[in-house]
Amino acid sequence: MATTYPYGYGTTRYSMVQYEKLTTVKYLHPEMWRRFRRLMELAAAAGVDLGVGTGWRIQPDPPPAGFAPPGNSHHESMPSPPEPRTATAVAIDTVPAKSWDWMESNLYKVGLRSFRKPSGWGYGGTNEPWHVQPVEIPAARSKRKVPYVLPVFPLPGDPPPDLGDFLMALTAEQQQQLYDRVMGSLPGPYSTGERPPTAGPRRFVLDDQDGGFLAALLERLAAKLEA
Ligand SMILES: [Zn+2]
């Protein structure tokens, strides 16, 4: 029988085939969905239920307390309005609450970050441990109208891409954000990444499900950004 995943805020469960027919999933940026889908699969393999509460949505107008106004949420398509239905949304509110501890310590493997506080990289917004979005984009949409170009993030189990090609696809700002947030979300300072006691390049020892890609990426970025 196909694996099923929790969906929404009740007791509904769907297979992945059913999941990918949902409107709230269909209008996610394909790379956002690709990353979160793998996280759902990793969670299921670890015996943890993880799914989508809401992905893409039309922001209510006027927005309830704590909601971004229309045109300013990563849950909406870009640009919006007037074209709110394109596969360009880059945020998911995840379910259920009992998955969030597991999720928080595994987000870095799939290129995502949450709005959980306190944060290891100094995130200062509202505490929303359920909200996830790509690690390399700013926390707030800031009325952005241009859809994000997201690089294909190497996921556990996939053959790692060429590191140089991957870095080339990121702007300098994206490189800095990715480095800060991945560093800030590693499970415990230097429990999986280590800095040698004397001067020299930082070395990382991470879960090698990704073929060592993330460790190599962090080493490259550390050498560049901490020089
Ligand atoms: Zn959200």
Image (cartoon, rainbow, N blue to C red):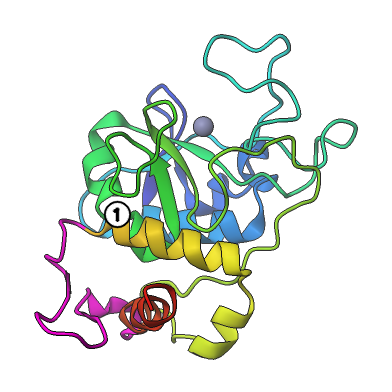
> Main structural element of the magenta stretch: helix, strand or loop?
loop
Judge: label 1 CB < 8 Å from ligand 1. no
Helix, strand or loop status at disc 1: helix
Q: Is residue 122 visible?
A: yes
Q: Residue 1 sits in which quadrant? A: bottom left
Position of residue 46 measured from the top left corner of the image (x, y, whole percent): 21, 57
Q: Quadrant of the C terminus?
A: bottom left
Q: Residue at x 71, y 9 (%)?
A: 62
Q: Residue at x 43, y 30 (%)?
A: 12
Q: Residue at x 46, y 62 (%)?
A: 178
Q: Residue 187 sits in which quadrant? A: bottom left
Q: Magenta part of the protein: which range? A: 187-212
Q: Is residue 80 above or below residue 106?
A: above
77 is within the stretch colored magenta: no
Q: Is residue 1 visible?
A: no
Q: Which residue is mark 1?
A: 185
Q: Residue at x 52, y 68 (%)?
A: 175
Looking at the image, residue 199 sits to the left or right of residue 171; the answer is: left
* Front in this rendered view, residue 154 or 198: 198
205 is within the stretch colored magenta: yes
Amino acid type, callout 1: Ser
Looking at the image, residue 63 sits to the left or right of residue 5; the answer is: right
